[in-house]
Image: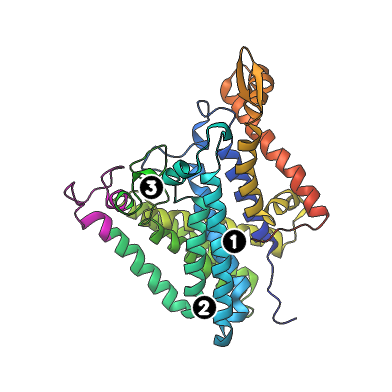
Amino acid sequence: MENKPQRLLSLDFFRGLTVAAMILVNNPGSWAHIYPPLEHAEWHGCTPTDLVFPFFLFIVGVSIAYAMGSKREDSTTHSKTIFKALKRSITLFLLGFILAFFPRNFSDFNFFEALSTVRIPGVLQRIAVVFLISSIVFLKLSDKRIFQTMVVLLFGYWALMNFVPVPDFGPANLEKETNLGAWLDRTILTEAHLWKSAKTWDPEGILSTIPAICTCLFGVLVGVYLKKKNVEPATKIAWLFSVGTLTVIGGLLWGLQFPINKALWTSSYVLYTGGLATIILSLSYWLIDVNQYNRFTKPFVVYGVNAITVFFLSGLMPRLLNMIKIDFEGEKVGALSYTYKAWFAPAFANPLNSSLAYAVAFVMCWYVILWAMYKKNIIIKV
């Protein structure tokens, strides 16, 4: 019993809330009609949507501290634990690759042509890399060394992006196509394998994965502190809330020189989002785990226990369903497109509302599926 990992209901709640938000912002009825808070910032800046991915990586870090904590002290188990983490990382990467590779229309699908242009980076791919590296760092380094590693990586990334000249372009800069990270992605991955909406840069690129690892390690350190048995819950909450607040302030101040930017995953963005995640988790821990106010948590826990599963399937199913063509006003449209155009769009005068209503309905449909899985104790572990 002593080796059984502790489980935080507040962490499952936070994970579920984050994944539900991720699905909501990824599936509007119309990409042309989205409320500003549900869109990513154009470049510098941070909207609520820009908080979703770093929150998830932060939660991954907290989960690492809880799931691998008992194995950390016994170095004889490290190889086995790292191998399991490697297998999970490979699985996550392949799932992300499948989503990128999966055709939107099989009728004109060419395997080799698709392989030559498939996007290599992605959300699940980044989670895979960050999870593996963070797991190894957690097992092999002390808490103090992890913090020092974060400091070195964040300042090192800041220095690279602000002072290293960009080949073929000149001085260091933070513009979309001419920053060092964009150049590195084009050089190593080539434009054919980058984000199709940009082609010349990728929001989940190689260089920006370095600070993304720091976001996960931030969560690791928070998880380590939450697990301490010799610290009273009230003290934990006070410290975490204070650290989160100070980190948010630090991120905002650093952002004056190194702007908060999700696509670049700037060091200021790491501090800002990590601080907010710490504040939210500490408040959730106080409310749910300490004071046992947990009746409202079930819908989000249902999402949280099958987080990767629902993220993958919610990305795959629309592509499958839109292969079913239905006639709408003289043209053939996909089944989900038809659902929006025929049912949701006419029901609202404001297209922003119809687009949002569709996204909410999409989230609720998945909730019904996940609820059925939860009731039957079906938890798919990746």
Structural crowding at the residue carrying mark 2, measured as other residues with C-alpha within 10 Å and reported as few (<14), some (14–19) or many (≥20)? many
User: Residue 201: percent from the left, percent from the top?
Assistant: 35, 45
Label 2 to label 3, Cα distance in Å? Answer: 30 Å
Location of residue 216 with respect to 316 vertically, above or below:
below
Find residue 282 and name its label: 1
User: Residue 220: percent from the left, percent from the top?
Assistant: 52, 68
Instruction: Tell me the residue that label 2 is attached to.
Output: 139
SS at mark 3? loop
Chain-order first, disc 1 or disc 3: 3
Location of residue 148 with respect to 120 vertically, above or below:
below
Magenta range is 159-184
> Residue drawn 30% across and 59% down?
158
Would residue 178 be counted in the magenta stretch?
yes
Label 2 to label 1, Cα distance in Å? Answer: 24 Å
Instruction: Tell me the residue that label 3 is attached to.
Output: 261
Apparent side of residue 152 relative to residue 355 in the rendered image (left or right): left
- Which numbered disc, 2 or 3, marks the residue closer to the eye? 2
